[in-house]
């Protein structure tokens, strides 16, 4: 039984807990309500509170994370009016910006409450259970901060439970300081968490393991270009996962929490709060409730449609014979509503999460956040950046992914130097991890986001807003930042300056 099957039962309690925590900042505690400290005194209650730390993932990965990443990459575009990320005109009052900020901090706040109150529990069934709970909370806190620092740069670092309003009023930490905190939490989680779970309350499959924490840390170190650190962690992880022979099984609910992934958003309830609407939000308008909110970029569109629809289109990025293509995109043989003059089947849609087995808009399929395939690609990229080797391990890793996708292996004859191998890895990441909220972060960490997106903007006579770039303080690369939500400057008088360009 996975974690979120239980959230539907404990969701109301968690809302009351969180609501009381928020109200206590501004108002006295109402009579007759159990105090927060009492709610953390039993193992059962603190596991319920821990389940609440996962809860923000459910809303984050329904649409907002996809919107801010896929639309702001060269993979996705939208013909709809919610096109601010697509055109890089996001405003500090933007709803998705506010919601992503709030949801990640909601997870951080809940994690802090669990970590701070572990000593209050008097009936732990074992010492191990206390370690499991702390390790999960630290992993999740690191995950939420990793989202925030990549979107916004330096953010307030809050690592204790919020009791008064002033506890939440913190100045922005630097990017370096946020990453220091992330690494501290993940290194602790690696020591606290088991390699696997045997089942039972608090030990369900789907909770992060020590392998999950190592995998996330490898992603963090990749972002920071700590190539040796990535290689070290990847060597420890190599062989602990698998590549599924059928690529689509990573996303269609048939292999959830398998060895193919280290961490997934655990959808699976029966109500909107515990399911995802990605199936209908990405489906064609011809299908019931289909919104086609994000479409794959396609050079055949010639820049038409209102968004950045073309230029280095992902439709053209697939090689002949790539078994992943039909799982990732499909035209369904439908009419082209962007350009009706073109024949049926000339417009592609994102097919990766299309679900006809669950009620429309209530897909129970998990959303993978860290897959084994990504770790292989991290490993290969880091090895190549350290030293190109024409017969080295990096080629073996790259070709594991390619052969599994039905493609011919790459050779040193084709990729004869570091630069060519780098481009091959970048292309492979683009296809393998398409529409999994990865491409924007990759383009940004490589320092090429502006140049890649400008290819698309050229078709519509736009110019990428370079005033929204900073020099990343750790890598020195050009780095795009989203604006801090405007409301946070009202909520937090200590917040400081807005990001440049807004």
Image (tube, helix red, strand yellow):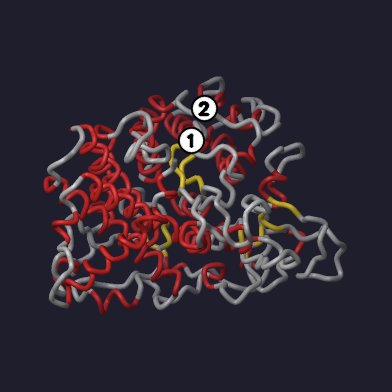
* 174 lies above or below 258: below
Instruction: Give the side of residue 387 with respect to residue 313, left or right.
Output: left
Crowding at label 1, few (<14), some or many (≥20) Cα neighbours within 10 Å?
Answer: many
SS under mark 1: helix
Q: Residue at position x 60%, y 77% from top? A: 81
Q: Quadrant of the N terminus?
A: top left
Tell me which label, 1 or 2, sits earlier in the chain: 1
Task: Pick whichever, 477 or 131, lies toward us.
Answer: 131
Seen as rendered, the residue at the extreme top is: 391
Q: Position of residue 441 (x, y in %)?
A: 46, 53
Q: Secondary structure at mark 2?
A: helix
Q: Is residue 424 left or right of residue 265?
A: right
Percent x, y for residue 388? Answer: 50, 28
Please tell me the numbered disc located at residue 381. 1
Against 491, residue 240 (above or below) is above
Name which residue lies at 51% across and 34% down.
Answer: 258
Quadrant including the C terminus: bottom left
50 and 499: which one is in front?
A: 50
What residue is shown at x 56% (from left), y 61% (from top)? 277
Label 2 neighbour load within 10 Å: few <14, some 14-19, many 20+: many
CA–CA distance in space, label 1 to label 2: 7 Å
Query: Which residue corresponds to mark 2?
Result: 394
Estimate the x, y position of residue 361 in percent, counting from the top left: 60, 62
Q: Is residue 376 left or right of residue 21?
A: right
The mark found on residue 179 in the picture is none
Disc 1 and disc 2 in contact, CB within 8 angstroms: yes
């Amino acid at each position: 039984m996975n974690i979120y099957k239980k959230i539907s039962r404990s969701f109301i309690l968690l809302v009351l807990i969180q609501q009381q925590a928020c109200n206590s900042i501004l108002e006295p505690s109402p009579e007759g309500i159990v105090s927060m400290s009492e709610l953390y005194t039993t193992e059962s209650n603190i596991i319920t509170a821990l389940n609440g730390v996962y809860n923000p993932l459910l809303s984050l990965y329904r649409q907002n994370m996809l919107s801010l990443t896929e639309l702001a990459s060269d993979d996705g575009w939208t013909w709809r009016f919610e096109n601010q990320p697509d055109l890089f005109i996001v405003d500090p009052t933007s709803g998705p910006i506010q919601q992503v900020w709030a949801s990640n901090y909601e997870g951080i706040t809940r994690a802090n409450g669990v970590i701070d109150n572990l000593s209050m529990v008097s009936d732990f069934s074992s010492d191990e259970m206390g370690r499991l709970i702390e390790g999960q909370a630290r992993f999740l806190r690191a995950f939420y901060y990793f989202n925030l620092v990549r979107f916004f740069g330096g953010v307030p670092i809050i690592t204790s439970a919020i009791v008064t309003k002033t506890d939440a009023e913190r100045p922005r930490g630097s990017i370096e300081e946020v990453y220091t905190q992330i690494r501290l939490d993940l290194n602790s989680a690696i020591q606290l968490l088991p390699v696997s779970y045997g089942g039972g309350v608090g030990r369900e499959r789907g909770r992060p393991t020590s392998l999950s924490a190592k995998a996330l840390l490898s992603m963090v170190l990749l972002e920071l270009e700590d190539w040796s650190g990535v290689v070290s962690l990847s060597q420890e992880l190599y062989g602990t996962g698998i590549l599924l022979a059928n690529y689509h099984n990573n996303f269609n609910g048939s292999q959830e929490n398998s060895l193919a992934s280290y961490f997934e958003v655990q959808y699976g309830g029966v109500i909107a709060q515990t399911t995802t609407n990605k199936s209908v939000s990405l489906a064609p308008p011809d299908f019931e409730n289909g919104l086609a909110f994000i479409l794959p970029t396609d050079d055949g569109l010639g820049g038409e449609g209102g968004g950045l629809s073309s230029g280095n289109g992902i439709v053209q990025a697939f090689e002949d014979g790539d078994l992943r293509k039909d799982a990732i995109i499909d035209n369904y043989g439908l009419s082209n509503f962007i350009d009706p003059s073109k024949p049926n089947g000339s417009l592609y849609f994102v097919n990766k999460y299309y679900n006809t087995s669950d009620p429309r808009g209530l897909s129970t399929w998990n959303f993978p956040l860290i897959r084994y395939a990504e770790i292989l690609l991290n490993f290969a990229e880091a090895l190549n950046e350290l030293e190109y080797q024409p017969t080295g391990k990096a080629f073996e890793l790259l070709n594991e992914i390619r052969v599994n996708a039905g493609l011919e292996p790459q050779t040193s004859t084709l990729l004869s130097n570091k630069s060519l191998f780098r481009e091959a890895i970048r292309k492979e990441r683009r296809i393998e991890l398409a529409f999994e909220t990865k491409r924007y972060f990759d383009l940004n960490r490589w320092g090429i986001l502006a140049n890649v997106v400008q290819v698309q903007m050229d078709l519509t006579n736009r110019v990428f807003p370079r005033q929204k770039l900073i020099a990343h303080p750790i890598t020195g690369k050009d780095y795009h930042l989203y604006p801090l939500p405007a409301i946070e400057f009202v909520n937090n008088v200590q917040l400081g300056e807005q990001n440049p360009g807004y």
